[in-house]
Image (tube, rainbow, N blue to C red):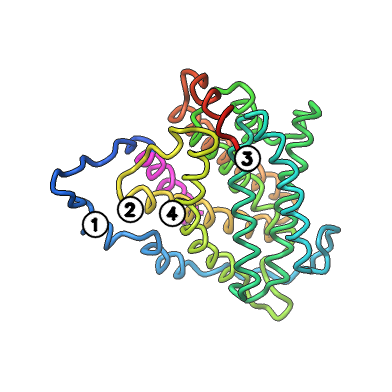
Amino acid sequence: MHLRHSIKAAVIGLAVVLATGSVAAPARSDGVDPLAPVNALLQPSIFDPIIGLLAAFPTPYKPYTGTICQSGSPQCIVDVIAEMKARLAPLAASCSHDAIFSLAYLRVTQNVKAAADAGYFHDRAWLTRIDAVFAHKYFDTMDAWKAGHTAAVPKAWQLALQATKDRTMTGLGDFMMNMNAHINNDFPYVLAQVGLTAADGTSHKADHNAYNDRLDSLYHPVFDEETARFDPTFNKINIGNVDEVLVGAIMRGWREIVWRNAEALSNAPAALRPLVEQEISNYAAGQAQMIRQVFASRSSTARDAYCATHHG
């Protein structure tokens, strides 16, 4: 428990630093990047040795009994990508602020497929089920919200989706709000449902950790695409590799917390599970409140006008 709270405190601190570090480093007249020496040393992967030392808690194997992607077939991700594209198209065309996360999630899923196709993961079937179940949890949440079934929508998602509906966040704020809700609120349940341990007793944490490096490669291209299509201020944070390191650290912290919460869900006695679920909900909602305060926007008029001619 102390480890989980320490990680959470670190993530909150890093998020504040990221949010307040939105001023670009001054350019030098001689064209030399003053941050070049720092950039050469700082990479998000500097945190991986620490993450690697955080061993998985022994969790019994539990066979997956869900109905989504039972086979673990690669076709599952192909189908998810097709649905994501179909859902993104009208959001982008209408310049809905929901398009920010919809686009980012599509790009992440396409990257997952490429990684799986290249043999990046030890257990491809497990990773494929995780991807499909995770995506359908997002689809179900969006459908429930759109249908007005707000009681079925978790608190962190209510805060995120209300903010996109009201157009009260910056583009980066929308991204962070939605990412927080999907990772911190949804992901523990997906991991616990699909299973943390293989039939031979091997933990899946190595595959879970492995995707951190893949995420690192996505920040710049995805942020650039969000900037080009939806919000010209999306990528205003520009402090060499420092911003990338901070984002990478935040995501690693969140994903480590997710794994620990999934372990708690999997191992807690029935009488204690509601307490674990409440902690997950409270943490995700608390992160959402912080993000909302830091990334609030006074007006989206300029952003929406830009999107109208650039959404693609």
Q: Which of the two marks, 3 or 2, is nearer to us in this view?
A: 2
3D distance between C-alphas at marks 3 and 1: 37 Å
First along the sequence among labels 1 and 2: 1
Q: Which of the two marks, 4 or 2, is nearer to us in this view?
A: 2
Q: Which residue corresponds to mark 4? A: 248
Numbered badge on residue 125: none
Q: Which residue corresponds to mark 1? A: 38
Tag 2: amino acid: Asn
Query: x%, y% of residue 142?
Result: 73, 37
Q: Which residue corresponds to mark 3? A: 281
Q: Nearer the viewer, residue 303 or 169?
A: 303
The single residue placed furthest to the bottom in the displayed view is 200
Residue 309 position (above or below residue 40) = above
Q: Circle 3 sits in a helix, a strand or a loop, which is it?
A: helix
The single residue placed furthest to the left in the displayed view is 30
Please tell me whether the stretch drawn in magenta is mainly helix, strand or loop.
Answer: helix
Tag 3: amino acid: Ser
Q: Which of the two marks, 3 or 1, is nearer to us in this view?
A: 1
3D distance between C-alphas at marks 3 and 2: 32 Å
Q: Circle 1 sits in a helix, a strand or a loop, which is it?
A: helix
Residue shown at 48% from the left, 36% from the top: 172
- The reply to whether dot 4 and dot 3 touch (C-beta < 8 Å) is no
Residue 20 as seen in the image, left or right of residue 66: left
First along the sequence among labels 4 and 1: 1
Q: Which residues are drawn in magenta?
A: 1-18
Q: Which residue corresponds to mark 2? A: 241
Residue 200 as seen in the image, left or right of residue 294: right
Q: Quadrant of the C terminus?
A: top right
Q: Which of the two marks, 4 or 1, is nearer to us in this view?
A: 1
3D distance between C-alphas at marks 4 and 1: 16 Å
